């Protein structure tokens, strides 16, 4: 996975996340929308509507005082925690 910040302000971020598909992007977007201080999160991976880009572009907006990069970090840790919990539950059930 390769990350490239396209644009960043104090309250907005656009980041390319190379090598990922809808599966990961939907999970990350969902985690972002549950992150305190995040007001909007979406991604785009339609090259026909995005000037030919083929890698997903994550866009987020945050409230004043919430750094968008910190929000992505918080959401990513929550995704990891959920995955770890699922593996533990799966192992216990098997």
Image (cartoon, rainbow, N blue to C red):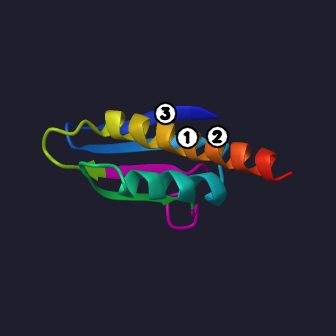
> Under tag 2, what secondary structure?
helix
Span shown in magenta: 46-60
> Looking at the image, which is closer to me, 52 or 19?
19
Q: Is 7 located above or below residue 61 in the figure?
A: above
Q: Position of residue 9 (x, y in %)?
A: 23, 38
Q: Residue at x 61, y 52 (%)?
A: 24
- Residue 52 visible from this viewpoint: no
Q: Residue at x 57, y 66 (%)?
A: 48
Q: Residue 81, which numbered label?
A: 1
> Looking at the image, which is closer to me, 43 or 36?
36
Q: Are the two marked residues, 1 and 2, in contact with CB atoms closer than 8 angstroms?
A: yes
Outermost residue on the bottom side: it is: 49
Does 93 lie within the magenta span?
no
Does 56 lie within the magenta span?
yes
Q: CA distance from mark 1 to mark 3?
A: 24 Å
Left or right: residue 32 compared with residue 1: left
Left or right: residue 43 compared with residue 61: right
Q: Residue at x 43, y 43 (%)?
A: 75
Residue 40 lies in quadrant: bottom left
Q: Position of residue 15 (x, y in %)?
A: 44, 41
- Majority secondary structure in the magenta region: loop
Residue for badge 2? 84
């Amino acid at each position: 996975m390769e990350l490239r910040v396209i644009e960043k302000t104090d309250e907005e971020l656009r980041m390319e996340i190379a090598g990922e598909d809808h599966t990961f992007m939907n999970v990350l977007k969902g985690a972002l929308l549950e992150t305190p201080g995040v007001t909007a999160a979406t991604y785009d991976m339609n090259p026909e509507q995005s000037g030919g880009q083929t890698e997903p572009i994550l866009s987020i907006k945050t409230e004043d005082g919430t750094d968008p990069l910190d929000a992505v970090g918080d959401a990513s840790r929550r995704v990891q925690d959920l995955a770890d919990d699922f593996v533990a539950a799966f192992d216990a059930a098997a």
